[in-house]
Image (tube, helix red, strand yellow):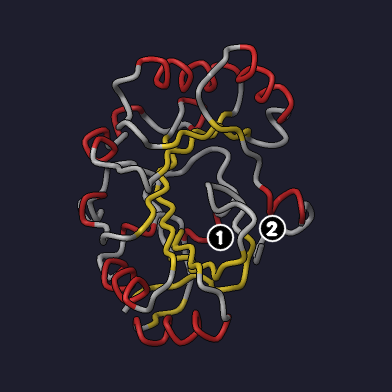
Amino acid sequence: MLLINEIYPAICGESRFIGRPCTLVRLTGCHIRCVWCDSAHSFSGGQAMAVDEILAEVAANGFSTVLVTGGEPLLQAGVVDLMKALVADGRTILLETSGALGHDKLVPLAEVPAGVHRIVDLKAPGSGISGDLIDWAGIAGLGSGDEIKIVCAGRSDYEWGRELVRAGDRFPAGVAVTFSPVQPDLPPRDLAEWILADRLDAFFQIQLHRAVWPDTDRGV
């Protein structure tokens, strides 16, 4: 059984799959508290569901892409069986995870089933999360189908991420790195112009779902 916070049809708002219709499966629970978190409702509540029940609801939505997120979805060991079942069902599976250590029940990134696209939200200093919690060993095992997302609350977060990209040895080759701004704290134009000025080999994105539904906090 898994504790599910919500399941709903959505537009992928981030990652290389941005703009694609999907079914979003949000698990309950998170062991960290980013200061800019936009899904605090996932910290508690939810409904216990079996994998078969979740598969049935996913099938009812009719989309081939499924986004598994939280909170922190890797806090629930049963998420591995869920992702295996979704892959076996022929669906494209995206996993959004914090890539943060600090909990003894956390499923390692290496145990995420083959075929799942791992999107790791690397915690910049502005998130309020200690750098000691970054799972660098897990990140080292990412592949070309995976992504790293760096959310920036300001210039210092951008510079932190920029130096990681420039170092050339902190991220595996072929893994896309994306920068996105915390809105309204950091104007998207500022971040885009910093990337261009620095000739940085990285992607830029905004949360598309927030741009489309700016006044809606849940279900988008």
- Give residue 217's mark: 2
Above or below 31: residue 162: above
Residue plotted at (74% across, 59% down)? 216
Whole-percent x, y for residue 149 in the image = 48, 38
Q: Which of 70 and 84 is in front in this view?
A: 84
Mark 1 sits on what residue?
41
The quadrant the N terminus occupies is: bottom left
Whole-percent x, y for residue 204 in the image = 60, 33
Above or below 137: residue 170: above
Q: Residues within 10 Å of mark 1 (few under 14, many from 20)?
A: some
Q: Nearer the viewer, residue 169 or 184?
A: 169
Do the CB atoms of the residues marked 2 and 1 lie less than 8 Å apart?
A: yes
Q: How far apart are marks 2 and 1 (CA)?
A: 10 Å
Please name the amino acid that badge 1 sits on.
His
Whole-percent x, y for residue 172 in the image = 30, 32
Residue plotted at (74% across, 26% down)? 189
Element at badge 2?
Answer: loop
Element at badge 1?
Answer: helix
Whole-percent x, y for residue 99 in the image = 34, 43
